[in-house]
Amino acid sequence: MRTILAIVRKEILQVLRDRIMLVQIFVPPILQLLILSQAMTFEVKHTDLALVDLDRSPASERLVERFTASGRFDVALYTASGDQADDALLEREAGAVLRIPAGFARDLGRGAAPTVQLVLNAEDGAAAGVVQSYAAQILAAFSRAELAPARSASSMRGVAVQTRTLYNPERGYLAYMAIGLLASLVTLVGILLTAQNIAREKEIGTLEQLNVTPITRGQFIAGKLIPFWALGLLELTLGLALIRFVFGIPFVGSVAVVYAGAAVYLLAALSLGLLVSTVAATQQQAMFVTFFVLVTFFFLGGIFTPVQSMPGWAQALAELNPIKHFAALLRAVLMKGAGLREVAGGIGAMALFAVVTLPLALARYRKTAA
């Protein structure tokens, strides 16, 4: 027993003397608990509407006011064009389209059950179902408020809703989740392998040997990152093949656009892996830091829960997260048929992340390796 206690005491002292280990043990779990427990929710708290009001009557204005007053919807686009409203769904400017037909107020006054159309972005089928239920509740409340004072309960004919879903008509979850997980796997290859590989060079001492050779640090870093960049693209290719031929999910958009986005995204992921390697002295530390970074990135990247369900501060953080833009790009191109123009903003955000992170990682690498 005394032997065991001596070993226990030695292990405790070893952990307490390692400040980096202490930080890794306590800080990341507490931060993740504080941030992710508030950010991750399936509740859709807010949806931007593209409004096509062809009636422009006091009754249609009251209906729109019902939507906005609920706190669940905001009108992001007013337009008389149905095509422009559909484009807003494609470009993620709106999450749903509300179309109010001409004659809405007239039919409502006659008790003729006017029909409004609700077009949903069903890319995430579960979230689309939640949005539809919110809209149905608002329309039911509007109907009761408009018709109940004038008619008996038996003759009430409320506002009917015609729902149309785009990009995922059957609201299946497989395509949404499989494509999101593919983004996660490509990220895993990019960050984890880079961080561990360079940390291993430090751990076994070969990094110091390489630094005294004629190889420049830029050549060394490029030689380290290019294989992982190619490996990430290979991982993407295998994943796309599985999704297409094993799961039978058709691709609506251009795969070339996917590869263009992935080429930029992998630069961002590899830069982050290189940055992690500069703060880790061992492979164990690199794995621990990478785990913390990946979990945070995955959960704040809209892989499992919609970004629009998160509180405002979490959505702002998500905009800085490259995996959020990469997952959105994959889903937009493969499920919605978005082109290079529609995803250019996301590619730009990923490129900006790489432009900021890579020089920072190279600067830290020079310090730690010198």
Image (cartoon, rainbow, N blue to C red):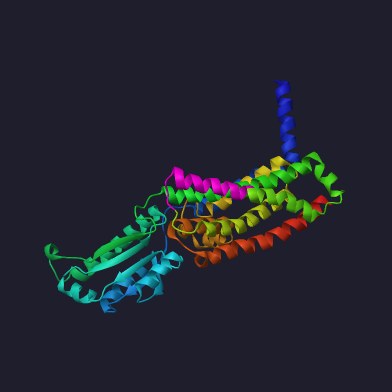
Image quadrant where residue 158 sits? bottom left
Magenta region, residue range: 231-250
Q: In the image, 79: left or right of 347?
A: left
Image location (x, y in percent) of residue 306:
46, 56
Q: Is residue 51 above or below residue 293?
A: below
**Screen quadrant of the N terminus:** top right
Up-down relation of residue 239 to residue 14 (above or below): below
Q: Position of residue 209 (x, y in %)?
A: 85, 44
In the picture provided, is 223 more to the left or to the right than 56? Answer: right
In this rendering, does residue 205 appear at all? yes
Question: Residue at 35% of width from left, 72% of height from top?
Answer: 82
Q: Residue at x 19, y 69 (%)?
A: 147
In the foreground, 252 or 228: 252
From this viewpoint, is residue 181 visible? Answer: no
The reply to whether the magenta stretch includes residue 318 is no
**Residue drawn 78% across and 54% down?**
219
